[in-house]
Image (cartoon, rainbow, N blue to C red):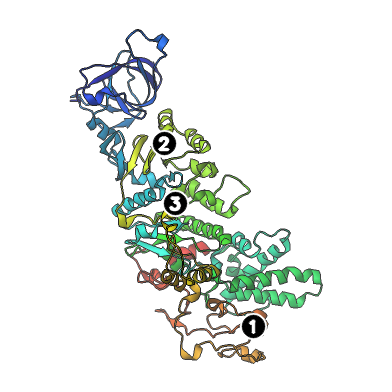
Amino acid sequence: MADAMTKIGRVVAVTGAHAIILLEKSDSLPEDMQKSPEIGTLLKVDTEPSIALALISSLSTPTPGAQSAGEDLQIVEVEFIGELPKDENGNPGNFRRGISCYPALGDVVGRASRQELAMAYASGGDVAVRVGYIKQDASIPAMVKTDELLGKHFAVLGTTGTGKSCSVALILRRILEANPLAHILLLDVHREYAAAFKDFGEIVTPANLVLPFWLLNFEEMVEIIIAGQKNREADIEILRELIPMAKQRYKGGRSGDKISRLRAKDGDDGAIGVDTPYPYRISDVTGLLDEALGKLEHKGELAPYKRLKARIEQISRDARYSFMFGSLTVHDSMAEIIGHLFRIPVNGKPITILELGGLPSEIINVVVSVLARMAFDFGLWSGGQVPITFVCEEAHRYVPFDDTLGFEPTKRAISKIAKEGRKYGVSLCIVSQRPAELDPTILSQCSTVFSMRLTNERDQELLRAGISDAAASLLEFMPTMGTGEAIAFGEGVSLPTRIKFDLLPADCLPKSSTASFSENWNRDVTDPAFLDNIVACWRQQTQITNIGFSTPAELSEDIARAPENQAEPAQPAEQQPVQPQPQEPVATATALSQPAVMQAAPAAQPTPPAAMEIPQIIGDDEQPVASPAQLRQPIVTQPPAVTDTHGHNVPVSNNVPVSNNAPPSEAALADSSAEPSLAELIRQVRG
């Protein structure tokens, strides 16, 4: 039987899904019942077929003139949200949304019992994980339905300092604990999540990130090379023509083909377009530019080619872009990169933390665009066999409301996941402190929202516009909620409710990015090496990992982790680069074809960064063609190729991160029947 109801009031008005209740005071009520209920409290009305449940949306007291002497009337407005249907014995069953029988005037109203609360907030048989407890009763766990949460996207919103990062880490950890073979990619803008997932996370930093330039589509490549400059239509069209030629040159295996021969392609060659994710060498692009420059006579025609060539050489030498352009060889590593980023196979690390801090600010949008596009395309071409969750921290940076801000391909890629990703097993988690600055199309696709403290009125109005009245009344708490509290509503939770997130263990908390002024301003910095170390990190574009004042030893460790100070992979003795000499040798065509080390550097030229002194080397059995820019740098011959199980030569790349959990090679994946074949998927994408 249903629990005996303790009467706290009666129904005095009913309008559709809303009702007005007049509270009644009684000295016979238990002490905890004497206090007036709060907004968001769950009340019940016992009807014949079910127990109707309603959330309090408003509380009021009439003006003194309307009250009788000695009375203190209290009026409660509620919204009915569901019911517990009774069986033939009168016992309440599982909660269901909607009302089959509305209460009548005069019906008795009471607070929902602990058993009824547990039934209302239970997952109803769906797979769910605990993330905290409900504020109405701390003994009732706050559960989120895993499939509803991930399958229809979710958002975590809240101002800085509300515990947003801890809440995201908690939700993801609880999901991973229940699903150890998950596949999650988290974009970490502030480098704070590595500490929260150190036990089962693959940490990717700018120092070990590998994202070859040839994975970029045309718009992304234009953003890097043209860099938003105006009136560069001629440059863009030249690049549009040369990139497919460079891909054909790589695929053909010969670097000496002429432009005229590349244009006369047919058959399977025509399948390679400007956006096809197929490898090519940046040296082939500059070589094609040199060929074109040799055929042009008018100065006006030369300018776009020269600009492109200069810009390509500039970014190729920039150490900050080494994760894209720094590989000594080019080989088809697309399957390996997808496996590494999306954890296929998992190898005990179901989540990848990609630290974007430290990447050049002008390229972060491009990196996010590539990753979001790859996540969606992988889901599309794999048929959703391996579901992926894409977590986007500080999402308002990448999908802003203002059309003049952000990078259009990034917005388009994330929007595609939000609109269509569910069909292909690609889910999206949006994390932001300014929902009003988010593209409303993206936020509207998030079927579950955890809204933490938000003090901006625009942010609050945006959320109120898309939820029910009862949940909207809960949002009135947002400006005053404490740290770690949230209003949870949507498909992933049974009912809109105010929850308190569980606390993570101290060793699983995200790293705080807030500097302690009171602590740091109580000590002085007297070490003369402190500023020198800061300047060294500054010039090497390496962020200091320790927040607050660091000791010189800590700074030295940071500098040692910089890409420019990493020890280069060991090479055979005969392939070690020779230090440039003052004299300038003359390189002949014969010399270029020999596996010897060349050296030349004009005295007036500054020495490039150590990590980028070695130019790109052409792979396979091709003869290298050196551009003028390459002749100004030391050149190293190609490292010896490795033979795979099929007898094919596989060039060695010195830029693939060495890890005990590195994904298998493309050949290994192709031979494996236990895991989905990434190699086959890549062929489908390109085919």
The N terminus lies in quadrant: top left
- Gap in angstroms between the C-alphas marked 3 and 2: 39 Å
Residue 47 located left or right of residue 263: left
| Residue drawn at the location 48% of the way across and 42% of the way down | 445
Q: Do the residues labelled 2 and 1 touch (CB within 8 Å)?
A: no
Where is residue 360 drawn, in percent x and y? 55, 63
Q: Verify CB contact (< 8 Å) between mark 3 and mark 2.
A: no
Looking at the picture, which amino acid does disc 1 mark?
Arg
- Where disc 3 sits, the SS reads helix
Q: How far apart are marks 2 and 1 (CA)?
A: 63 Å
First of labels 3, 2 by sequence position: 3
Residue at image mark 3: 424
Tell me the kind of residue under disc 2. Answer: Thr
Callout 2: 10 Å neighbours few (<14), some, many (20+)?
Answer: few
**Secondary structure type for disc 1:** loop
Name the residue beneath numbered marker 1: 632
Q: In which quarter of the image is residue 306?
A: bottom right
One can see residue 490 in this view: no
Q: Which mark is residue 355?
A: none
Q: Mark 2 points at which residue?
A: 480
